[in-house]
Amino acid sequence: MNFFLRIAKLSKKYKTESIFIDASWNLPRKGMFGLTGPSGCGKSTLLRIIAGLDGDFTGSVLVNNYSLKGMDENSRRDYRSSNIGLILQDYPLLNQETSLVNSTLLLECLSNEKKEIKQQKGFNLLNLFSLKGLANKKVKHLSGGQKQRVAGSISLSNSPFLILADEPTASLDENSAKKVFKILKDYSKRCLVIVSSHDLKLLQTSCDSIFKIEERKIKEVISYQNVEDLKTPFNFYLPKRKEKPSMPFLTRLRIAFNDLISKKLRFTLAFSSCFLSLCLAGFSSYVKYGMSKEIQKSLSSFCLPYQLVVNKKQIQEKKLFPCPPNRIEEVYSSYRQEIRSFGYHLNFDFSSLFKDDDSIYLLTKYKTIPLPYYSSRHINEFMWFEEKDFACFPDDIENVNDDEVILGLPFDYMSSLCLELGIERSFPSLGNYLFSNKVNLLLNVENDDIGFDNQELFTIKGVINTSLPCLFNSSSTWNKTIFIDHMQFRPSNEEENENLQYVYQIPYLYLENEERFYSKIKNDSLFNDLSFDPKSNTFLTSTCDSSFCLTSRVYVYKSNHSNAFAGDCLNLIDSFPCGYLPIQTNGFYADTSSIFSGFLPQFYLSSSYEDIKYVSESISSLPIEQAMLPLELSDKVYSGSLLSGLENKIKFSSLPKLLEKGDFPISLNEIVLSNGLFDKLGKPSSIYCSYEISSSSDKSKYYRNMSINVLKVSGVTSSEDLIFYAPPSFFEDYFFSSFKVCSSNLEKTGVVLFFNNQNDLIKGKELLEKNIEGYSFLDVDSFIALSMEETTTYIGTLLLFSTVAILFLSILLFCFVSIVNYEDDFSNRRFFLLLGLAKKENFYFYFFKCLILIFLSGFLSLLLMVPMTLFANFIISSSFSSKLSFSISCVPFLSILICMAIYVLISFALAKRGERE
C-alpha cells in the first residue's frame, strides 16, 4: 500500500529521557486517525515532528514522499505553509488583529487571489466554526474557546493535505467539541487528519482508527470505519498560488503598527526617547548655527568701538580707619577756603556705657521736668549751630557757648513741654519763656560697674522746630569738650578697645562746597591716603540714626594703602586724541578680561519720576537669592549697571567731538545723550538718575540705599545706540557732592580710553605699554574678534558633545525597549512559525515596528523644528538684545535625518539578529 505518512525506526530523546525508540507508523492519504496515551508519552512531540517543527530525531519520517529528516528551517517552513494545517491547544494568535485577519493571513501570503475573494474565503472559514459574527472582533477580546475555533479556521485556510490537531477541543464545551470533530471528520474525506486527544469517546465516534503511544512505540488499538455520515468537504482549493509565498507590504505595516501601539507604555517610552533625541539633535545644531550668527552680530553691540581699557593688574583690598587728629588738622590748614570747620564723632555704645542712668531733665526755678526723648547720645550727635537752616526762638542768638545749648524739638514735644510750663503752646512762646527765665538742662549719667557718675549742667538759650529731638551748639567740637574734657573719657584711634573709658573718635569736616573741595583734593598727592565720606556709611550706620547725620558733614578716614591711578599716566593720556572715563573701585567699572562696562552699584535713568522711584523702591529690599538678578524694567527705565540685563542697558562714553543739537555740558549735573536714548526717554530736557549709595544684608534680605537726583540734558549726538556721554568729573565730583558717595569708592584705578579709529588706538596702546608698568590693557575690538571664534568653537563643541551624549543615551534606551519588545514578540514569532511563514517575516515584523516608530518621531521632529528654530532664534536674539530675524537652515533637518539613519541601522542590526535566532 502506498502510504501518505511513513515513519520508520523513529527515535527521539528529550535531554536524557527517550520518548520514542524505533517507533514506526504508516497512515494513508485520507482518513481521520486518533492518537491517545497518558500525559507526557509523546503525543505532542510526534505531531511536532510530523509538522516539521522538530527536526532533532533519528529514523525516517516521510510525508507524501518528502523526507523531513535533514530538512533545513526554511524548507520545513515552506513544507508547513503549503501542506500542513495545525490546531494546537495553545495556538498563538495576533491578539491585536481581528478574527478575520488571523484567518486570512496565510491566504494573504500564499494566494494571488483578489482581496475580496480572500476575504470571502475567510468569512466562510469562520462561519464553518460558527464565528462569522465575530469576524471583526479583535482576538484579545475573545474567550479561550473562541480563540481555539479561530485556530481551527486558520488550519484549513491553506487547503492542507495533512491536518494535525493537538487537543483541539481542550477549551471547548461538549457541543462545540463535537462540531469541531465533525468538521475534521468531514475534511478527512479529502486529506489525512491526525487528532491527539484525551477524550476517547470523541475519538471513537469520529476516527477511522485510534493509536496509542505506549512503551515508546505507536500501536493501533482500535479500528473503525466511520464513513456513514461523511459530507463532501468545503472547497478551499487555492487556484492562484504565489511562486514565493510572502506577506503583502501593507499587511506587514498594518500588523506591525497595531502591535506597536498596543503596548502603550513601551511605545510611549520608545517614542519619547527617539523623538526627544531627534528634536535635541536638530535643535542643538540650529542653536549652534544661530548662536554663531548672532554672536558675530551682537558681541560688537555690547560696547562702543575703538575702546582701550587700562587697569591696574593688582588691586589690593582697602581698609579704612579714622583719620588721626594731626592729619585732619593738615587738611583743614591746607583747604581753609573750602572748610568751615571740623569736629569728631565719638563712637559710644551709649546703652552699655551709661546703663544705670542716662537721662536729661529741664530745670526751672519751680520744677524739674524729665525729657525722656533726650539722652547723652544727643550731645554726641549734636547739630552745629552755624549750619542751622531753621528759625530760632528767640531769633537774636548769635553764639552758643560750651555750657549753653539750644533745644531742637518737634511740635508735639514742644507742645507737651509748654503745657508743663503753663505757657502758650508755640515756639515763640517757649522762646520768650527761655529768654525771660533761667532754664537749665541737666545731663545725668551713671555706670555702677566702673564707678562712674557724672552730671553736666547747661543753660538753655533757645528752641528750634526740628523733625526729631536734637541739640545745637556753636562749637564744632562741643561733644568732644563734654565727653573728653569734662567727663574725662580718652580718645582712641583703635577700632576695638575693651576699656570703656576710651572713645573711638571719627573726624569730620564742615565744607563750604563739597563739589569744589573734592575736585581739588582728589588730585592732591599729599592726601591720597585719605577717604571722604559725605554719608557716614562706613562706621556710623550702627550708632547714628540717619536723621542726625543729614548735615553737611564729610567724615574723614585714612586707608592702609592707595590704588589710585598714577597722575603721570593721566598726563600721558591727555596727549592722546581721545577721551576717557575713570574706572573706579566701587563705581563705574571695566576690566581687561571682559568687554562689559558699567556701574558696580545699581544705576538707572528715566524721564519719569514715578518710574524711577518705583524701580528704586523695588530693589531697596529684596530676598538674598534675588538681590543680584537683573531687574525687569519698563520701557521708560534704562540701566547702566554692569550686571544688568542686555535689554534697556545703556553704554557710557566720554564727551563726543560733535553734537547734533544742544551744547556741551558746563556744570556737573549736565550730560549728553545719544539720539537713540534721547528718543527712547521721550526727548526730555532733564532726566532722573537713581544710584545705589550703600548696601547691607541680613540672613534673609539684601538692602540698598538708593538716591535720586536730576540731570540736565545739554546736548544730543546723532548715534541711534543707547549712549550716555559725560566728562570724567561727572563720575567723580558729581557722585561725591550730589549722591554723597564715599571717595574711596570713587578712587580711580584705571581708565577706559575712547579713540577715533583703530590706528590711534594701536599707537596709544603701544605708547602706554612702553611708559607705564603694573597695568594691563584690553583692545576691546580685537578681544571681540578673538572671542567670537573661541566662543563659537567652544559652544559648538559643547553642543556637539551634549547632542552625542543625549543621542547615545536615547539609543541605549531605544535598544533596551526594542529588545524587550522583541522578547515580548515571542507569541507573534511562534504564530508565524506555526503558519510556516519564512523567517524573514520575523525580520520584517520587528523592523517595520522600528521603522514606524522612527519615521513617526522623525516626521513630528521635522515638523516641530520650524517653530523650535523660530523660538531658538527669538531666545538668542533676546539674550543678545539684537533684532529678531528668521532664516530657514537645512542644518537641523539634516541632523535629524542623520540621527534617523542611525536609528534605522540599529533597528536593522537588531532585526537581523532576531532573524538569525
Image: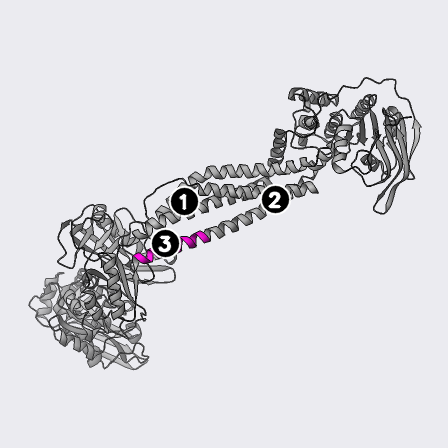
Circle 3 packing at 10 Å, graded few (<14), some (14-19), many (20+), is some
Q: Residue at x 92, y 31 (%)?
A: 220
Q: Quadrant of residue 249?
A: top right
- Disc 2 residue type (three-letter): Val
Rounded to the nearest angstrom, the CA distance separating label 2 from label 1 is 31 Å
- Disc 1 residue type (three-letter): Ala
User: Left or right of 739: which side holds 398?
Assistant: left
| Front position in the image: 243 or 73 | 243
- Magenta segment includes 784: yes
Q: Horizontal and vertical percent for residue 474?
A: 13, 72
User: Left or right of 5: which side holds 370?
Assistant: left
Q: According to the image, label 3 marks what residue? A: 788
- Disc 3 residue type (three-letter): Met
Q: According to the image, label 2 marks what residue? A: 817
Circle 1 packing at 10 Å, graded few (<14), some (14-19), many (20+), is many
Residue at the farthest left position: 396
Question: Mark 2–mark 1 contact, CB under 8 Å?
Answer: no
